[in-house]
Every structure is written in structure tokens, then in C-alpha cells.
Image (cartoon, helix red, strand yellow):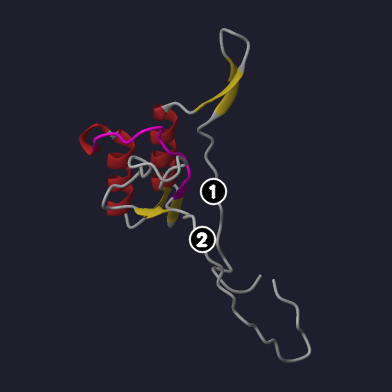
Amino acid sequence: MRGGVPNAKIAVYKICWRIRNKKGKEVLVCPQHKALEAIEDAIKDEVDVISYSQGLDYPVPMHKDCVSWAFLRAVEKDILISTSAGNFGPNYYAVVNGAPWVMTVAASLKDRFFETKLELEGEDKHLL
């Protein structure tokens, strides 16, 4: 492996499960206490980065967001936190996970196309 972090190790912590609700419909549940346990485990495992793609359905005031406070504990241990901004489009409340100590990542919509030319030289012209 070349580039990036060649000796990186990946740790995965499960926080969500598919279950059947009372009506028999399959739903995804992600209990908050499991997220907190996973963050604590990541701190104990001395990871360098936590990539947290779990977002809330709506913004929660920071003083009530225990996951954000757990992230602060991780940041104090020199762990970078990368969180998803949310999955609810261009609504005014669309960005969640906005604590100032995390790196919040989002995609955006665009109505234009940007083209870039790339010229490869040498014998090996494969682009990964």
C-alpha cells in the first residue's frame, strides 16, 4: 500500500442494528449509549481518527448532545473527529454534528460542471 497512511489500522465499532418494530417493519436503531461506548472504546484503543457518519434527524442543543461531549473527551486525547453534517438536504436545520471541536463534513449540490485535464506520463499510466 502506498500513499495516505500506509501503516494505518482500522477499528470498527458497531452502534446500529436492524430490528423489527411492533408492526413487523424492519427499522434501523442506533442507541445513543452504544455510540458513547464506541467512542470510549476508540479512546482506550488509542485511535488517531474517529469517522462518525451517524447524524441526528434534527439539531440538538449542544448542552444536551452527549455524543458531542464524548467527542470533546476524544479530542482532548488528540483524536481527530470527522462527523457527517447530516442527510436532510438544503433545509435550514440540515447541519447536525456542528460542535466546534469536530470536523463536520458535507456534500453540496451544484448546478455547474468543472472540467480538469489530467496528463499521465511514464510507463505506468494507471490511475487509482
Q: Under tag 1, what secondary structure?
A: loop
The extreme top residue here reads 22
x%, y% of residue 79?
A: 37, 55
Residue 52 lies in quadrant: top left
The residue stretch that appears in magenta = 51-61
Q: Amino acid at mark 2?
A: Asp
The residue pinned by badge 1 equals: 11
Residue at mark 2 to residue at mark 1: CA–CA distance: 37 Å
Q: Residue at x 59, y 75 (%)?
A: 115
Please tell me the numbered disc located at residue 111. 2
x%, y% of residue 106?
A: 44, 53
Please identify the dominant SS of the magenta region: loop
Q: Is residue 62 left or right of residue 7?
A: left
Quarter of the picture holding the C terminus: bottom right
Q: Residue at x 75, y 83 (%)?
A: 125
x%, y% of residue 100?
A: 26, 52
